[in-house]
Structure formats: C-alpha cells, structure tokens
Amino acid sequence: MVNSADFAKRLEKILEYYSISATAFSEQIDFNRSTISHILSGRNKPSLEFVMKVVQEFPEVELYWLLNGKGTFPAQQETSLEISRSETTVPAPKKNTTIASEIPQSLPKSPSEEKKDISAATNKIERIVIFYTDGSFKAYEK
C-alpha cells in the first residue's frame, strides 16, 4: 500500500526537479489541480490513472520509486548491454515467407562468448511488471 505522506514527498521532488508548479504539473499530466493539491497534502492517495500519467509524461520517474521510494530519481541510464538485451526482438514473418528463411545462420561461438552466455544465464529475475492497455498493471516479485 502506498504511504500518502511519502508519496507526497516524492511528488514534491518531481516538481522541484522540473522546476514547475503544481498547476503546471497538473496541466502537463491533464489532471485537476485540486487532485494534485489533495495528494500533496496527504488527504488523498493517488489513483492508478494518476501514477501512470506521471510515469508516462516524465520518463525520468521510475514507477517503483514513485510508488515505494525504492530505486532512483531521476532514473539512471541503462548500460548498453542492458539496452541491447531489452531491445532484441524477433521480426514478424512477412507474407508468403517462412520463419526459417528469416533466421540467420549462426557461426560457432568462441570460448569467451560461451562464458558470457553462461554468466547471463545465472542472472536472476527480480521483478516482472505487466502493463495493461486500460492503464492498470500487475507486479510480480519473489
């Protein structure tokens, strides 16, 4: 459950970081000014819609940091290795072609490449977050 007072402090950090007022912030995320005021005062808890708009509008804000205060703000750049892993996708097959025709033939791996594969396999998943089109999400943790 989100602690309203701590969430308000994190929201104030966001306003401070971007040097914007609560009114400008409310306009940017398309929310009522009174909603922002109530969240900042601790009177109301943020809705999922509010949290998702903040995360979508401000890419430096990490979801987990905003909700729980864990992580960093502003979000740190991913390393090139993490980016290349996360951006690896399999292209959709074209009409009238087979998937096998699109798979490149791989060369035998060198011993150093095999060691990299083994070390990557020992990494453990910390958290999986699934975002739905209606703005809701579900987080799975150990």
Image (tube, helix red, strand yellow):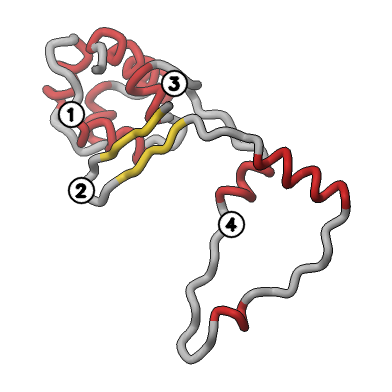
Indicate which disc, 2 or 4, sits on the residue closer to the N terminus.
4
Q: Secondary structure at mark 3?
A: helix
Indicate which disc, 3 or 1, sits on the residue closer to the N terminus.
3
Distance CA(mark 1)–CA(mark 2): 13 Å
Indicate which disc, 1 or 4, sits on the residue closer to the N terminus.
1
Q: Which residue is mark 4?
A: 88
Q: Which residue is mark 1?
A: 47
Give x and y (percent) for residue 20.
Answer: 34, 24
Q: How many marks?
A: 4
- Circles 3 and 1, Cβ within 8 Å, touching? The answer is no
Q: Which residue is mark 2?
A: 134
- Circles 1 and 2, Cβ within 8 Å, touching? The answer is no
Give x and y (percent) for residue 55.
Answer: 35, 35
Q: Secondary structure at mark 2?
A: loop
Crowding at mark 3 (Cα within 10 Å: few <14, some 14-19, many 20+): few
Q: Amino acid at mark 3?
A: Tyr
Indicate which disc, 1 or 2, sits on the residue closer to the N terminus.
1
Q: Amino acid at mark 4?
A: Thr
Indicate which disc, 2 or 3, sits on the residue closer to the N terminus.
3
Q: Which residue is mark 3?
A: 17
> Is 3 drawn above or below residue 129 in the view shown?
above
Give x and y (percent) for residue 16.
Answer: 40, 17
The foreground one among 123 and 23 is 123
Q: Residue at x 17, y 19 (%)?
A: 45
32 on left or right of 90: left
Give x and y (percent) for residue 141.
Answer: 40, 29
- Circles 1 and 4, Cβ within 8 Å, touching? The answer is no
> Is 100 drawn above or below residue 43 in the view shown?
below
